[in-house]
Image (cartoon, rainbow, N blue to C red):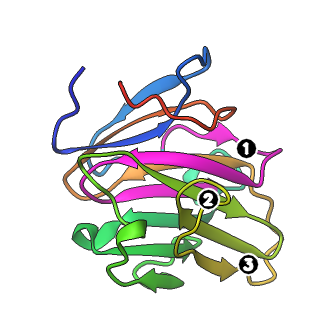
Amino acid sequence: MALLWSQVLILICCVTSSNSEIIHIDADAPYMKFINIESKTSELIWIKGRQDAAIGLFQFSNTSSMVYEFIIGGWSNTLAAIRYKQHYPNPLEFTKHEPDLLLNPHQFMPFWVEWTSNNVCIKPGTVGSNGQAMQSTRFNDTTPIRYISFRTGMKYALKFAYDLSCKKPNISL
């Protein structure tokens, strides 16, 4: 199956995983598939696409329970942002054109997302790798993070595959 130029592919799957699933999301579609991450505090996500990938962290499996949202390759793939409870258009943190926190339509880029009781963070690469991290404090917010979901914005469709138990992507989809 060929990846269309206008698609974003978020990949969290292993070559040998039997739990992997591929989900197709149309452009501008809301968060729809919620994945339980209650026992986790971090996740490695591989993304390939032009712009506007969003990763949401939620208390419950519905969009009104969003706690944080990470935007990667937003604003025509020029900025990344962290939003607290969907406060648009004023994200907590921006990074200017930092190539490590943007998308690439030609290759998969790894992003490490982490949430603790004190902060949330997204950084390029896998855990332990070097790279410019973007983080924010949790505002004394003790809301438990139990679900993760993905969406895209603007005019580009989204396709992602996941398996939350793996750390190595299968980029031959």
Q: Report the residue at 46% width, 75% height from top.
A: 81
Residue 47 appears anywhere in the view = yes
Specify whether 90 is left or right of 114: left
Of marks 3 and 1, which one's residue comes earlier in the chain?
Answer: 1
Q: CA distance from mark 3 to mark 1?
A: 18 Å
Q: Report the residue at 55% width, 54% height from top.
A: 63
The residue wearing badge 1 is 37
Q: Is residue 68 above or below residue 93?
A: above
- When asked about the image quadrant of residue 38, the answer is top right
Q: Quadrant of the N terminus?
A: top left
Q: Report the residue at 16% width, 42% height from top.
A: 5
Disc number placed over residue 113 in the picture, else none: 2
Q: Quadrant of the C terminus?
A: top left
Q: Residues within 10 Å of mark 1 (few under 14, many from 20)?
A: some
Q: Is residue 8 above or below residue 159?
A: below
Q: CA distance from mark 2 to mark 3?
A: 14 Å
The residue type indicated by label 1 comes to: Ile
